[in-house]
Amino acid sequence: MQLPPGGPVTAPSAPPAPSTPDATTATLAVLLIGPAGAGKTSVAKFWADHRRVPTAHISLDDVREWVRSGFADPQSGWNDNSEAQYRLARRTCGFAARNFLANGISCILDDAVFPDRPVVGLGGWKRHVGPGLLPVVLLPGLEIVLERNAERTGNRRLTDEEVARIHGRMAGWYGSGLPIIDNSQLDVPATARVLDDILARSIASPPKW
């Protein structure tokens, strides 16, 4: 039997290098954590407004204030009613987020989640939204938070003592493994760009929380 003449053997092509995940086009669920005055709402709105894919901003405070008559304002004293209304608002936000995600719409939620309350904090949000939720902490310096809080009006403005207490508790996120943005010297667009960079890394290597 005569074998066919030999020919050059083509080496198999190398697999393409993995591309960096693009956080600007992926369908994401993001939880932006921070104290009052950190700029969560402003950053979340800007980030949602400027994405190249449909994105919703879900603000816990906005949903909580859907209750008009009978609204339990924690500034008047934290009690069972205010605790229950916060829990209800979080469940409602989680339901809305799952609904948006199921229809291909990304969402960013914002909340003042404390590191020393894992069951009702991150654990609760994970149950409400799903395991793919990407948490990011926004934590500028105390003096910046106090300045921004002073510009607030209505029931969203807190006393300086309360702001300092909340900020101190939020410092517990350092060492937690969650990504933290110190936006003390960043405007909103710059903070949103840093957020995109962090989310790209979180997509590639999800944080353990």
Image: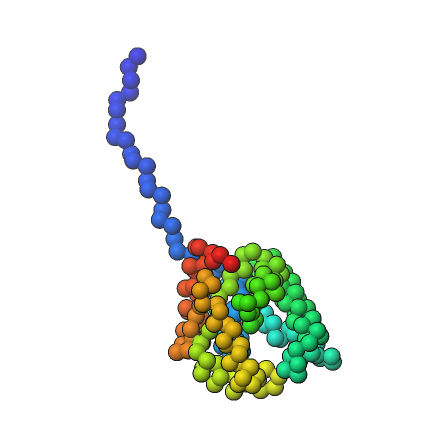
Q: Is residue 17 visible?
A: yes
Residue found 38% across the figure and 50% down from its top: 18
Residue at 41% x, 64% y is 197
Is residue 180 found left or right of 68 in the rendered image?
Answer: left
Residue nearest the observer in this picture, 72 or 26: 72
Q: Nearer the viewer, residue 164 or 39?
A: 164
- Counting the numbered discs, the total is 0
**Horizontal side, residue 182 vs residue 116: left or right:** left
> Which coloring applies here?
rainbow
| Horizontal and vertical percent position of residue 144 | 45, 82
* Identity of the residue furthest to the right in this view: 69
Spot occupied by residue 34 in the image (x, y as percentages of width and height): 51, 73
Task: Please identify the quarter of the rendering in which residue 114 is found.
Answer: bottom right
Does residue 22 show up?
A: no
The percent coordinates of residue 142 (x first, y second) are 46, 80
Tell me where residue 200 appears, x and y as whole percent. 43, 60
Q: Is residue 197 left or right of residue 118?
A: left
Q: Horizontally, is 168 left or right of 185 in the view?
A: right
Who's the residue at 59% across and 69% down the image? 58
Residue at (63%, 67%) from the top-left corner? Answer: 90
The picture quadrant where one finds residue 181 is: bottom left
Vertical arrangement, residue 114 with respect to residue 153, above or below: above
Question: Which quadrant is home to the N terminus?
Answer: top left
Decide which of 75, 101 is in the foreground and name it.
Answer: 75
User: Which residue is farthest top?
Assistant: 1
